[in-house]
Image (cartoon, rainbow, N blue to C red):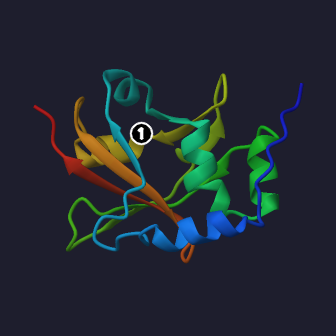
Amino acid sequence: MKKTYYYKFLPTKAEEEAAKATPVLDPFNPWQIKKVVTDADILTGKLVLSHQEVFEYVFRYWTLEMCNYLLAGNKFYAVIWDHTDDKNPVRYHNEKIYLEQGPQDTYMLRWLDLVRNSSINPSDEIGFYWQSRSGTFQFKVLRRGF
């Protein structure tokens, strides 16, 4: 059974007023998707993202063709910029970095190279967001675990 998701493009007057009161994305803290890394995320090299996270913070910036490509079961090879060291961001782009559909309305971000090179450990807090201007994922370790 194929699921169809609809996005309401024309807001009501009340929604427009509420949106005006909503703050704009903070340029100093743009990390929309925040996760605490688990052992499984590191061992499998897959970061599990919920449908809500991907729909709200990634798909809304993609074209319909990009969304349909991923939803058809294809892998979306992506570029990830690691901003953990703000002065020297690192670019990751190879056959091991991609977004794919997972089980039960989840998505998997394959990030094994990033995990290995950034020394990510369980209980580290990380942040992600999709930068539509460059068409890349932006990543940062927000807080090192214990």
Residue extending farthest left: 146
- In the rendered view, would you say 72 is above or below 22? above
Give the residue displayed 62% in from the left and 37% down from the top. 51
Residues 128 and 118: in front is 128
State the quadrant of the N terminus: top right
Give the residue displayed 22% in from the left and 69% down from the top. 86
- In the rendered view, would you say 1 is above or below 32? above
Amino acid type, residue under disc 1 in the picture: Leu
Horizontal side of residue 89 vs 128, given as left or right: left
Q: How many marks?
A: 1
Residue 125: x percent and y percent? 26, 41
Residue extending farthest bottom: 133
- Residue count near mark 1 (Cα–Cα under 10 Å), binned few <14, some 14–19, many ≥20: some
- In the rendered view, would you say 83 is above or below 35? below
Residue extending farthest front: 14
Residue 126: x percent and y percent? 31, 46
Give the residue displayed 42% in from the left and 55% down from the top. 32
**Residue position for label 1:** 112
